[in-house]
Image: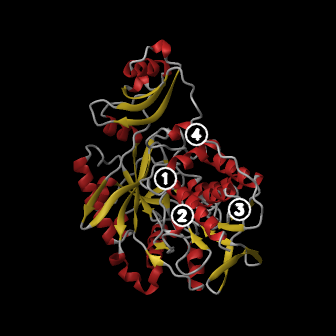
Amino acid sequence: MIKEVDLLLKPALIGSNEAIRKIAARKANIPVEKVNAIRILKRSIDARKKTPHFWVKVAVYSGEKMGALYETVKFAKPDNRFTVGIIGSGPAGMFAALRLLELGIKPVILERGSDVQLRRRDLRAIQQEGKVNPDSNYCFGEGGAGTYSDGKLYTRSTKRGDLRKITARLVQHGAVEDILVDTHPHVGSNKLPKIVENIRKTILENGGEYHFNSKVTDLIVDDQKIKGVVINDNQERIFDAVILATGHSARDIFELLQSKKIFMEQKPFAMGVRIEHPQALIDKIQYKMPERDSNLPAASYSLNCQINGRGVYSFCMCPGGIVIPAATAPGEIVLNGMSVSRRDSPFANSGMVVEITENDLAKYKEFGVFAGIELQKAVEKATFDAGDGSQKAPAQRVTDFVRHKVSGSLPDTSYIPGIFSADLHEILPENISARLTGGLKYFSKRVNGYYTDEAILLGSETRTSSPIRIPRDKDSYQHVEVEGLFPAGEGAGYAGGILSAAIDGHNSASLVAKFIKTL
């Protein structure tokens, strides 16, 4: 017999399997001595009441054996009749490759950056020396931007595919099983590199190819059909199909598509700043207690409002995390956030961004589909030019920003390159800074304690998503004009985060297989 029951547990009980077993047996009306096993199916935190609790859905086993928590996929080596090129090794590219191997098709991943081990050298250079390697940084390299991130796996794209299948592949390659049951799962930047490396090993061991430092510099297109690519200006590779999964910061790929007259279109995106609080303050606000219980994770938040017809909202919130330099070229400052699996930094950070629409891009109208990218570039350059030529970020206390006052001093920050005091209103476009001001005023009334001089804003958060979409047919996922070209993931404008990008890559590979059968 297997019974599923819902439990409301105090934090002190969440780590005790024996206590959960007894409570679950009682709730299931089964004598505890007849319970041979329990399994947690879902787990979430409810902090709405006076004291936070865990909601836990448990399967109670009596006289039944537990099966495997997830299905392990066994990959068969492809027969090599067909080969698919995958440009980019981020979540979309990696999971496209895994899916192709499931279907007996050979994937060839082309990654402009380094593998995860060598990539760390370039991350150290930007953090400590302010040196940006345009091909190996927090955005480019094995695993893409997701490798050195919080590893958040929450997505609202629940209808796009089998989320559990994706998370199960991550567990199969080294992620903790908790991600299969937590409502807001995360992996952690300290765990992701090894998982990414394990995925690469699976792909190689089963007949796929991986090529690092292999930048795609041209597309071979004949009669509106893609035939292959040119790598590093001198090497041609011919493929039966190409999955374009380059991420939202590969601006040279957008330029390449434009030079080949391959259709693209503008899409909405958002820009703003990173906001950073002491984690203890966010814990106090969210959990309504002086100090966080040791069994509770670092608290997170999600905020949104409308200011003058545009959304102002928190984005990519990293509890117990750090702010990182995510520039992909010299002469710019781009910020993002990350955290390790323990989320034990004394700081909490989040993007605080404003929706950008076509009306905001009038100044850049002459750039056509690249108007959004030009706005990004302008803000990133202005942020860099405000400083001393390093990756130090301009910062302002939240209260001073709202009062249009340069901060006389700044609190400690997690941002390793360092910060300096500046008026962010002079760096950000007025339509962004004014709405951020309005949003912060609104949040100060809704969330007691959030608006404080202990919190700072750091400039600038510009790469929330791609300002460009590479249109594809909704049924075949092929580009609307180029046969055999499959745009996928964040860079194509069809995903926003690790999980949604992985699902999109997986789905794209399935449709590539259908396309190949017609050749």
Real-space Cα separation, disc 1 to disc 4, in angstroms:
30 Å
Real-space Cα separation, disc 1 to disc 3, in angstroms:
36 Å
> Disc 4 or 3, which lies upstream in sequence?
4
**From this viewpoint, is residue 418 visible?**
no
Q: Which residue is mark 2?
A: 489
Q: Which residue is mark 1?
A: 337
Comparing labels 2 and 1, the label whose residue is closer to the camera: 2
Q: Which residue is mark 3?
A: 105
Question: Can you give x and y, in whole percent of width and height, for residue 460 in the image?
Answer: 44, 63
Badge count: 4
358 over 174 or under it: above or below: below
The answer to which of 48 and 435 lies nearer the viewer is 48
Tell whether 382 sits left or right of 50. right
Q: Residue type at mark 1: give it.
A: Gly
Q: Which residue is mark 4?
A: 70
Asked whether the residues under the numbered discs 2 and 3 touch, taking CB atoms below 8 Å apart as contact, a structural biologist would say no
Q: Residue type at mark 3: give it.
A: Ile
Question: Can you give x and y, in whole percent of width and height, for residue 424 in the image?
Answer: 37, 64
The answer to which of 387 and 408 lies nearer the viewer is 387
The answer to which of 227 and 68 lies nearer the viewer is 68
